[in-house]
Image: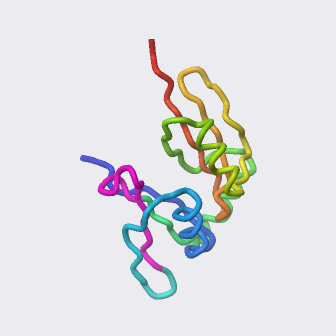
């Protein structure tokens, strides 16, 4: 068994697609119109055959209260691995990304949390070398 798809609920799929590709640097894997919405997935430039990230429409009534509670409590919806949180933080800030938690050393990892402009907080994480 392996994970092939993960994702986040987004307010606006086209806005999310621009943010996740133009700002974060992911690549479109699928963009298939399905009536009112689309099946849109992105992948990492570093692993184009790896796990796909679905930009899922936030249309279901339960999604709004769930995401609102997460954001109000400062809880990231998901986490992306990076090699260097400080460098990624600087790169994204230069592109106008708003961070709600700057790079923070948590012992075995360094994390930072940003607003994806589509209703979610997203964490980036760097695993520190273990002795």
Q: Which stretch is magenta?
A: 38-52
Coloration of the structure image: rainbow
Vertical comparison of 42 with 125: above or below? below
Judge whether 60 appears above or below 8 on screen: below
Position in image of residue 91 (x %, y %): 63, 48
Spot the residue most to the bottom. 35
Counting from the top left corner in percent of width and height, residue 33 is at 42, 83
Q: Position of residue 28 (x, y in %)?
A: 42, 68
Total numbered badges shown on the rendered structure: 0
Image quadrant assignment for residue 103: top right
Q: Residue at x 53, y 45 (%)?
A: 79
Picture coordinates of residue 35 (x, y %)? 46, 88
Q: Nearer the viewer, residue 100 or 47?
A: 47
Asked if 39 appears above or below 101 in the picture, the reply is: below
User: Residue visible at 53% across and 22% down?
Assistant: 108
Asked whether residue 52 is in view, the answer is yes
Quadrant assignment, res 66: bottom right
Is residue 103 one of those drawn in magenta? no
Residue 44 covered by magenta stretch: yes
Asked whether, in this view, residue 24 is left or right of residue 29, the answer is right
| Quadrant in which the C terminus is drawn | top left
- Name, please, the residue furthest toward the left: 1
Q: Is residue 70 visible?
A: no
**Near-viewer residue (38 or 112):** 112
Vertical relation: 126 (above or below) 56: above
Q: Residue at the spot x=32%, y=53% of the render?
A: 50
């Amino acid at each position: 068994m392996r994970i092939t798809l993960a994702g986040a609920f987004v307010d606006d799929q086209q806005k999310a697609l621009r943010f996740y590709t133009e700002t974060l640097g992911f690549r479109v894997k699928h963009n298939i119109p399905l009536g009112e919405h689309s099946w849109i997935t992105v992948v990492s430039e570093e692993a184009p055959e790896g796990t796909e990230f679905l930009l899922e429409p936030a249309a279901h009534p339960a999604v709004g209260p769930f995401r609102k509670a997460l954001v109000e409590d400062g809880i990231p919806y998901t986490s992306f691995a990076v090699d260097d949180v400080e460098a990624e933080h600087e790169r994204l800030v230069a592109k106008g990304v708003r961070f709600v938690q700057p790079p923070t050393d948590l012992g075995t990892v360094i994390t930072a949390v940003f607003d994806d402009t589509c209703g979610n907080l997203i964490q980036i994480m760097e695993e520190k070398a273990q002795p």
